[in-house]
Amino acid sequence: MTALVIAEHDNAALKGSTYNTVTAAVQAGGDVHVLVAGHNAQAVAAEAAKITGVTKVLLADGVQFADGLAENVSAQALALASNYSHILAPATAYGKNILPRVAAKLDVAQISEITKVDSADTFERPIYAGNAIATVQSIDKIKVITVRTTGFDAAANGGSATVETLTAVADSGKSSFVGREVAKSDRPELTAAKIIVSGGRGMGSAENFKILEPLADKLNAAMGASRAAVDAGYVPNDWQVGQTGKIVAPQLYIAVGISGAIQHLAGMKDSKVIVAINKDEEAPIFSVADYGIVGDLFDVVPELVKQLG
């Protein structure tokens, strides 16, 4: 029994999501191999080889993998699929773009966003916006799985796996890379941040979101938002936390002016410590908060900044 993890990377370094996915693969049992499909990605393969639990790294290097086109990466995974009992990728935009293609071609049922491995063929995943957990057992010969990274600790470094260079599959010709718009920020990446300060509809305007910046600066935190704030145009889409946004589980999550709709809670309730600031003491956010402050955010947030020195 051997698992293949499809690495998410930028051709220079692994994304943190790969480390969490390796942890899930190790828990499924057997050996764990990592596929690095990229262009001039030798450094990524070397990094993957150092992950504890990884026994082999497969490097498929070619210009056709430079931009992570799903058609090409999935073709490379399919070329190897018969050697594996499990194929896993993080449940990020990258993994969600690739694995459904792999599952369809293999004619198996994908198991999406697992948060726990019960055994080699049985997994747990959230349903109904995280209000219930489904236990799924698969009888497919090859299990195709996306991993919700917040459900697993990141694997440590300390391994010494071998790196094997593969013959890369040819460009499928089905798609081509046109361009990429990347949001640039001096703050930590939202899905990897240890502390997040999020604002909701209660912020009232895009201008008022600036009130949160000194707090985020003091804590070296990422900034997030509820869907209501994003839909209102207060902040960009890539700030959205929730069922239809980004799933996060930082050490500290500060929810400011967020009522706590079920869709938002689904994206952040696994945070280690949750602090809620809201003037409505009946707001649902307080049901999941470890600490709550009932008050006007326009008074509370500046006072918090002042107390933090």
Image (cartoon, grey):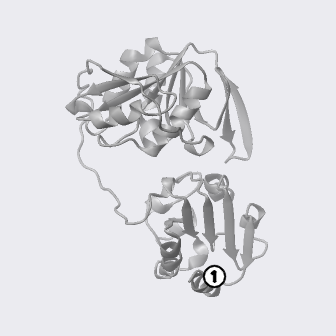
Q: Residue placed at 28% from the left, 40% from the top?
A: 67
Residue hosting label 1: 297
Q: Is residue 83 left or right of residue 287?
A: left
Q: Is residue 282 left or right of residue 115?
A: right
Label 1: how many Cα within 10 Å (few below 14, some 14–19, many 20+): many
Residue 117 in the image: state x and y as whole percent: 66, 30
Question: Amino acid under label 1?
Answer: Leu
Q: Is residue 239 above or below residue 232?
A: above
Q: Residue placed at 40% from the left, 30% from the top?
A: 49
**Residue 260 visible from this viewpoint:** no
Q: Residue placed at 29% from the left, 37% from the top?
A: 43
Q: Tally the marks.
A: 1
**Residue 272 visible from this viewpoint:** yes
Q: Is residue 32 left or right of residue 119?
A: left
Pick whichever, 164 or 300, lies toward us: 164
Local secondary structure at mark 1: helix
Instruction: State the quadrant of the N terminus.
Output: top right
Pick whichever, 245 or 20, lies toward us: 20
Pick whichever, 245 or 65, lies toward us: 65
Q: Is residue 264 above or below residue 79?
A: below
Which quadrant would residue 40 be assigned to in this image?
top left
Instruction: State the quadrant of the C terminus.
Output: bottom right
Residue 289 in the image: state x and y as whole percent: 73, 64
